[in-house]
Image (spheres, rainbow, N blue to C red):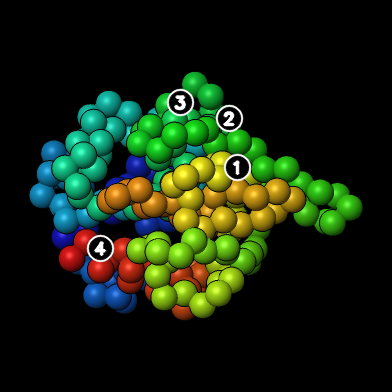
């Protein structure tokens, strides 16, 4: 059973629909204690990083403990940003801190008509060997909507560019994250979710 964590800022309906279509069994835990029996965790998210404040305390501790036991963890959009140390969007709110680095505001480029927020389809530069992005065609296009992004670090397995490069997908052991919305990214997005489900099995 995969725990889809609802902290009031996730687009749970579309994520749940996509995962259910792939045959996943899902639950939405009401307490942090319920995470102990989950086969995997997914932290979705849209909007402002400050919403992750709801994951402080017991939720944060339970998610860190599960990841420490080797339970697969996937962060989506703001959920991926939360895996890092924090974000300039809400400097007073700590991230989970499993991945090193801070999330920063994207830069636009008026001359190239690259606006912020970054909304729409963009190509991924995929790192060979990624379990999360396995089987994708070269340069797959996925759907983004965000104003902040994580830096490209050693954990980045998929980069994208919007005036400058940023981490679009990250992977470290059993911890995964995507800045884009796989549930809205057509066949490529479904393949990524299917890959995560295979990791959970």
Residue wearing tag 4: 199
Residue toward you, 79 or 157 = 157
Q: What element carries label 4?
A: helix
Instruction: Work out whether residue 28 can be spotted.
Output: no
Dot 1, how many residues are within 10 Å of its Cα: few (below 14), some (14-19), or many (20+)? many
CA distance for labels 2 and 1: 8 Å
Q: Which residue is drawn at 44% across and 47% down?
A: 155
Question: Which circle marks residue 93 in the picture?
Answer: 3
Labels 2 and 1 touching (C-beta < 8 A): yes
Mark closer to the chain start, 2 or 3: 2
Name the quarter where the C terminus is drawn: bottom left
Q: Quadrant of residue 120?
A: bottom right
Q: Mark 4 or 1, which is nearer the eye? A: 4
Q: Is residue 113 or residue 12 the one in the foreground? A: 113
Q: In this view, does 102 lie to the left or right of 68?
A: right
Q: How far apart are marks 4 and 2 (CA)?
A: 32 Å
Q: Earlier in the sequence, mark 2 or mark 1?
A: 2
Q: How crowded is mark 3: few (under 14 residues within 10 Å), some or many (20 or more)?
A: some
**What crowding class fits label 2: few (fewer than 14 Cα within 10 Å), some (14-19), or many (20 or more)?**
some
For the point 55% across and 36% down, the residue is 103
Whether residue 96 is situated above or below residue 47 in the rendered picture: above
The reply to whether the C-beta atoms of the residues labelled 2 and 3 are less than 8 Å apart is no
What residue is disc 1 on?
A: 148
Residue 89: image tag? none
Q: Is residue 68 left or right of residue 108?
A: left
**Residue topped by disc 2:** 88
Instruction: Identify the image quadrant of residue 40.
Output: bottom left
Going from the N terminus, do you reach mark 1 or mark 3 first?
A: 3
Question: Residue 138: percent from the left, percent from the top?
Answer: 55, 74
């Amino acid at each position: 059973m995969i725990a889809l964590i609802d902290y009031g800022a996730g687009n749970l309906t579309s994520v749940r629909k996509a995962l259910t279509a792939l045959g996943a069994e899902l639950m939405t835990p009401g307490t942090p204690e319920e995470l102990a029996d989950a086969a995997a965790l997914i932290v979705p998210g849209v909007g402002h990083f400050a919403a992750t404040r709801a994951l402080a305390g017991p939720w944060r501790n339970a998610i860190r403990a599960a990841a420490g036991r080797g339970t697969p963890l996937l962060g989506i959009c703001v959920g991926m940003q939360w895996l890092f140390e924090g974000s300039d969007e809400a400097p007073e709110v700590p991230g989970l801190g499993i991945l090193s680095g801070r999330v920063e505001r994207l830069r636009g480029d008026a001359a190239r008509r690259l606006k912020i927020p970054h909304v729409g389809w963009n190509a991924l530069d995929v790192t060979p060997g990624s379990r999360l992005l396995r089987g994708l065609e070269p340069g797959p296009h996925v759907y983004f909507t965000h104003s902040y992004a994580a830096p490209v670090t050693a954990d980045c397995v998929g980069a994208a560019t919007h005036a400058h490069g940023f981490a679009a997908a990250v992977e470290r052991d059993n911890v995964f994250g995507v800045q884009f919305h796989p549930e809205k990214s057509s066949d490529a997005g479904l393949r990524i979710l299917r890959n995560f489900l295979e990791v959970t099995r």
